[in-house]
Image (cartoon, rainbow, N blue to C red):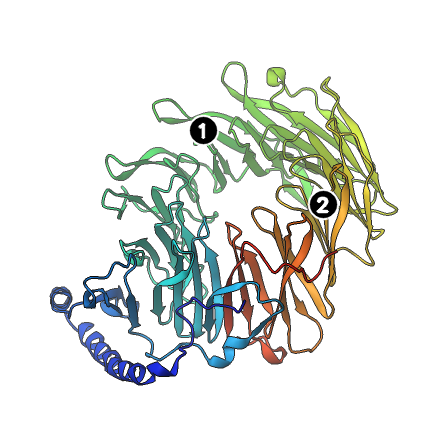
C-alpha cells in the first residue's frame, strides 16, 4: 500500500489541470497587492471610519467570499489577514456535508503548492503498511505539535523564517480522513502555547508578543477567532503570558509574569468570553503563576506583604475580595487546597498561617504554627532560624513545615476543630506527603526512615512506623500506598515493604543484585517490581497478592541501562540500552518473559512509547553514523497469533525530534528537523501524520 497524502499541504499532481491551474493562480495574484494597499490605508483611518469600511466591505463582497481580520501589533489597528472562498454557491444542488472552502492568506505569497517537491521524499517505508494522512513542511522550524484530548484535532505551529509564522490545524472527518480547517499566518509574533477544552470546540493560545487568543469552531467546523485577550506588548527576554482553562472549563485565567497582572474571563451565554470586573488590579508578584483549583471559585494571590482571596461571582460578573490581610514581612509562599476549603500563608520568618472557609463562603484564620528562632548553621553561615518550606496535603486537613534547622512539623485539626501542631520531626533530611496526602515519609539518613499515617485512629501521629534499610537513600510509595520500595546505590538489594495486617510495617520481599541499585519501580497493578543494578542486570520481580516474591526474570545488559520502566497498565516493561530495546511481558502462567528484542544497527534509541490499548509500541531514535538516514521510527504490533511483530520501519533523511501516538492510539505523528551538515541552524522541519490500519500484511517482517 503506497502512502496516501490527505493534507492540503501537498504538491499538485495531474498535468490535465495545468492550464486551468495557471489561470486560477494568475487571477488570484493581484488580490495580494490589493489587500496590501487596503491595509496600508486602513491603518491611517480613524476607528469609526475603519469600522464603516469593514462593514461596507463585508456587505459588498461577491458571493462565496468572506474575510477574517486581526489587530496588527505594530499600529494596533485592524487589518485583513485572510480571504475565504466557498464553491458551494456554484453548485446549489450539492449534498456535501462539508463545504468546499479555499483560503487565501493575505500576509504570504500565493503559490501553487507550499512544499518544495524535494522535501516530499524525506522518508522511506519498509512495508508501506501505514497511510500518510498529513505532511506539513516549514522552511525554518516547528515549535509545537499538539493533539486535542480525543486525537480528532491536530495543531502544528511553525515558521518559514524569523518573520513568517504559521498556525495550521487539521480535523478528522467522519470518514476518517484529515482536512485542514484553519491556517493563520503572522509576522513577528508566533503562537507558542496551546490548550484545547474538553469539548474540543475552543482553542486557547498565547503569543510571543503577549496576546492571548481564544478560537471556537464555527458551524462549518473551522476555527474562527472569537476573542483576543490583550496584554501590553512584551519586550525581548520577557516571559510569555500564561493562560489556562479552569478545571470546570468555564473560566480562563491569564497571568502576565512581567507585572504580575491577573485577569479572569468567564464563558457567557453567547459562547463568548467576558472579563470579570475587578475592584482593583490583581497582582501576583515574585511567586509562580496561579492555577484554579477543582471548584475554580476562588483565587489566592500574594503581592509583597499582602495576601488576598478573591471569589469569582458569575451573578455580579466580578471578582470579589473575600479575605485581605497584610503581614509583617514579605510573603514567600501561599497555597490553596485542592477543594478550595483551606489555605496557607508563609511570610518570611518563623510562622506560617492557616485559613479556612466556612459554609457561608467567608474566610478566616484558623491557626498558625511557629518554629523556634535560634541561631543555626546554614551553608556555613550563622543565621536566624526560619521556615523555608510549607505545604498542604491533598485534602487540606494537614500541613508540613520545615525550617533551616532541619526540623519538620506536621500540623492539622484537633478534636475541637483547632489547627494545632500534631507531630515534631527533628533532625530529618526531608519530610514529604505521599501522593494522596494520607501519609508522611521522613528520612533521617543512613537508610533510616519513618512513616506516619494521617488517617490512623485518633490522628494523634504519636507512633510512626520505622523503616530501616542500611545503604538506601530512596523510598517510594506504590500507587495505592499499601507498599513501599527502598533502594540506593550503596545497597545491593531492593526491599519491598507492606503491612502485616496488624498495623506494622514489615519487609515483604527482597530483589538482590551484585552491586548498588540504580533504579527501582513498582507497576500500577502492584504485582511486579523492576530493578536496575549497577551490575548491569535488570530484574523484574513478580509478587503474590500478599506482596511475597515469585521467581524473578533476569535480563543481562552489556553496559548501563539508559531507559527502563513499565507500560501505563503495568502489563509490559521496557529496557533500552544503546541500539537495543527489550519488551517484557507475561505468559499464560503470569510469569514474566522476554517477548521482544530489537536491535537497530547504526542507530541509538531515544524513546519507547505504547499506544492507548497497548497493542502497539513505537521506538524512535537517531543515527550515529553518516549513512544519509539520521532518523528512524519503528512500529511494532500484536498479530493474530498474540505475538509481537515488527509492522513498519520508517527511515528519514532528517533527525527525529519526536514521535508519538495520538491519544486514541490510531495514528502516529513524527516531527523531524533538518540540521544537515551537523550544524544547529534551523533549515526546515516536517511533521508526518500516519494512519495505523486495523490489519497489516500477513507475513511479519520480524518476530522475536
Identify residue for label 1.
355
Is the C terminus in the top left, top right, bottom left or bottom right quadrant? bottom right
Q: Where residue 456 appears, x then y in whole percent? A: 63, 19
Query: In this picture, is 300 found above or below 222?
Result: above
Going by the picture, which residue comes out furthest to the right?
514
The residue that appears at 51% across and 71% down in the rendered structure is 685
- Location of residue 543 by image quarter: top right
Q: Where residue 276 appears, x then y in whole percent? A: 28, 43
Mark 2 and mark 1 lie on one chain; the one further toward the N terminus is 1
In the image: residue 482, left or right of residue 347: right
Q: Nearer the viewer, residue 172 or 418?
A: 172
Query: In this picture, is 361 found above or below 306?
Result: above
In the image: residue 623, left or right of residue 663: right
The residue that appears at 41% across and 61% down in the rendered structure is 178
Which secondary structure lies at badge 2?
strand
Q: Can residue 426 be seen?
A: no
Q: Where residue 225 appears, x then y in whole percent? A: 29, 58
Q: How many marks?
A: 2
In the image: residue 488, left or right of residue 565: right
Q: Nearer the viewer, mark 2 or mark 1?
A: 2
| Label of residue 380 in the image | none
Q: How far is the residue under mark 2 from the one under mark 1?
A: 50 Å
Query: In this picture, is 444 found above or below 559?
Result: above
Which secondary structure lies at badge 1?
strand
In the image: residue 1, left or right of residue 376: left
Q: Nearer the viewer, residue 153 or 374?
A: 153
Q: Where residue 49 appears, x then y in whole percent? A: 11, 67
The residue that appears at 27% across and 65% down in the rendered structure is 71
Identify residue for label 2.
585
- Location of residue 558 by image quarter: bottom right
Amino acid at each position: 500500500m503506497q502512502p496516501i497524502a490527505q493534507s492540503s499541504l501537498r504538491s499538485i499532481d495531474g498535468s490535465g489541470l495545468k492550464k486551468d491551474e495557471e489561470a486560477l493562480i494568475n487571477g488570484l495574484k493581484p488580490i495580494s497587492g490589493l489587500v496590501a494597499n487596503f491595509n496600508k490605508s486602513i491603518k491611517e483611518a480613524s476607528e469609526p471610519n475603519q469600522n464603516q469600511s469593514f462593514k461596507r466591505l463585508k456587505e459588498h463582497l461577491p458571493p462565496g467570499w468572506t474575510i477574517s481580520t486581526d489587530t496588527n501589533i505594530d499600529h494596533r489597528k485592524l487589518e485583513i489577514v485572510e480571504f475565504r472562498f466557498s464553491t458551494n454557491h456554484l453548485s446549489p444542488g450539492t449534498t456535501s456535508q462539508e463545504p468546499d472552502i479555499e483560503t487565501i492568506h493575505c500576509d504570504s505569497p500565493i503559490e501553487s503548492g507550499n512544499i518544495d517537491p524535494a522535501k516530499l521524499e524525506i522518508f522511506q517505508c519498509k512495508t508501506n503498511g501505514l497511510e500518510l494522512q498529513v505532511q506539513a513542511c516549514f522552511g525554518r522550524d516547528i515549535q509545537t505539535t499538539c493533539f486535542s484530548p480525543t486525537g480528532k484535532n491536530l495543531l502544528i505551529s511553525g515558521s518559514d523564517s524569523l518573520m513568517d509564522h504559521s498556525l495550521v490545524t487539521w480535523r478528522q472527518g467522519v470518514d476518517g480522513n484529515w482536512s485542514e480547517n484553519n491556517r493563520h499566518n503572522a509576522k513577528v509574533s508566533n503562537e507558542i502555547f496551546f490548550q484545547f477544552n474538553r469539548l474540543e470546540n475552543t482553542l486557547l493560545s498565547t503569543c510571543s508578543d503577549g496576546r492571548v487568543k481564544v478560537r471556537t469552531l464555527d458551524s462549518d467546523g473551522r476555527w474562527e477567532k472569537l476573542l483576543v485577550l490583550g496584554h501590553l506588548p512584551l519586550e525581548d527576554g520577557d516571559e510569555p503570558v500564561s493562560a489556562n482553562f479552569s478545571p470546570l472549563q468555564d473560566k480562563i485565567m491569564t497571568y502576565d509574569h512581567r507585572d504580575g497582572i491577573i485577569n479572569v474571563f468567564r464563558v457567557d451565554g453567547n459562547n463568548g468570553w467576558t472579563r470579570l470586573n475587578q475592584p482593583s488590579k490583581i497582582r501576583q508578584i515574585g511567586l509562580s503563576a496561579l492555577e484554579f483549583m477543582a471548584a475554580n471559585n476562588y483565587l489566592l494571590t500574594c503581592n509583597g506583604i499582602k495576601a488576598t482571596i478573591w471569589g469569582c461571582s458569575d451573578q455580579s460578573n466580578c471578582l470579589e475580595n473575600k479575605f485581605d490581610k497584610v503581614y509583617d514581612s514579605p510573603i514567600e509562599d501561599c497555597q490553596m487546597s485542592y477543594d478550595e476549603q483551606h489555605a496557607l500563608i508563609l511570610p518570611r520568618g518563623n510562622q506560617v498561617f492557616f485559613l479556612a472557609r466556612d459554609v457561608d463562603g467567608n474566610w478566616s484564620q484558623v491557626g498558625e504554627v511557629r518554629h523556634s528562632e535560634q541561631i543555626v548553621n546554614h551553608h556555613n553561615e550563622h543565621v536566624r532560624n526560619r521556615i523555608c518550606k510549607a505545604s498542604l496535603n491533598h485534602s487540606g486537613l494537614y500541613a508540613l513545615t520545615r525550617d533551616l534547622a532541619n526540623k519538620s512539623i506536621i500540623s492539622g485539626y484537633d478534636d475541637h476543630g483547632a489547627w494545632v501542631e500534631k507531630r515534631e520531626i527533628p533532625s530529618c533530611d526531608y519530610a514529604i506527603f505521599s501522593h494522596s496526602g494520607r501519609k508522611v515519609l521522613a528520612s533521617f539518613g543512613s537508610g533510616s526512615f519513618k512513616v506516619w499515617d494521617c488517617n490512623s485512629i485518633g490522628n494523634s501521629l504519636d507512633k510512626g512506623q520505622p523503616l530501616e534499610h542500611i545503604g538506601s537513600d530512596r523510598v517510594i510509595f506504590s500507587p495505592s500506598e499499601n507498599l513501599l520500595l527502598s533502594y540506593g546505590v550503596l545497597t545491593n538489594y531492593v526491599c519491598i515493604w507492606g503491612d502485616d495486617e496488624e498495623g506494622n510495617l514489615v519487609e515483604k520481599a527482597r530483589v538482590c543484585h551484585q552491586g548498588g541499585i540504580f533504579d527501582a519501580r513498582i507497576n500500577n497493578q502492584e504485582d511486579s517490581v523492576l530493578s536496575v543494578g549497577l551490575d548491569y542486570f535488570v530484574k523484574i520481580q513478580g509478587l503474590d497478592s500478599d506482596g511475597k516474591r515469585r521467581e524473578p526474570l533476569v535480563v543481562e545488559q552489556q553496559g548501563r541501562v539508559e531507559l527502563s520502566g513499565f507500560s501505563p497498565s503495568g502489563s509490559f516493561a521496557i529496557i533500552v540500552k544503546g541500539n537495543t530495546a527489550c519488551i517484557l511481558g507475561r505468559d499464560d502462567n503470569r510469569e514474566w518473559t522476554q517477548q521482544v528484542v530489537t536491535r537497530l544497527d547504526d542507530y541509538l534509541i531515544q524513546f519507547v512509547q505504547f499506544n492507548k490499548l497497548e497493542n502497539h509500541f513505537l521506538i524512535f531514535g537517531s543515527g550515529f553514523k553518516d549513512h544519509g538516514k539520521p532518523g528512524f521510527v519503528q512500529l511494532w504490533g500484536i498479530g493474530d497469533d498474540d505475538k509481537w511483530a515488527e509492522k513498519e520501519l520508517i527511515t528519514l533523511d532528517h533527525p527525529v525530534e519526536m514521535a508519538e501516538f495520538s491519544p486514541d492510539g490510531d495514528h502516529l505523528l513524527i516531527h523531524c528537523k533538518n540540521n544537515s551538515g551537523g550544524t544547529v541552524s534551523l533549515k526546515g522541519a516536517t511533521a508526518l501524520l500516519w494512519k495505523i490500519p486495523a490489519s497489516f500484511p500477513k507475513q511479519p517482517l520480524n518476530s522475536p
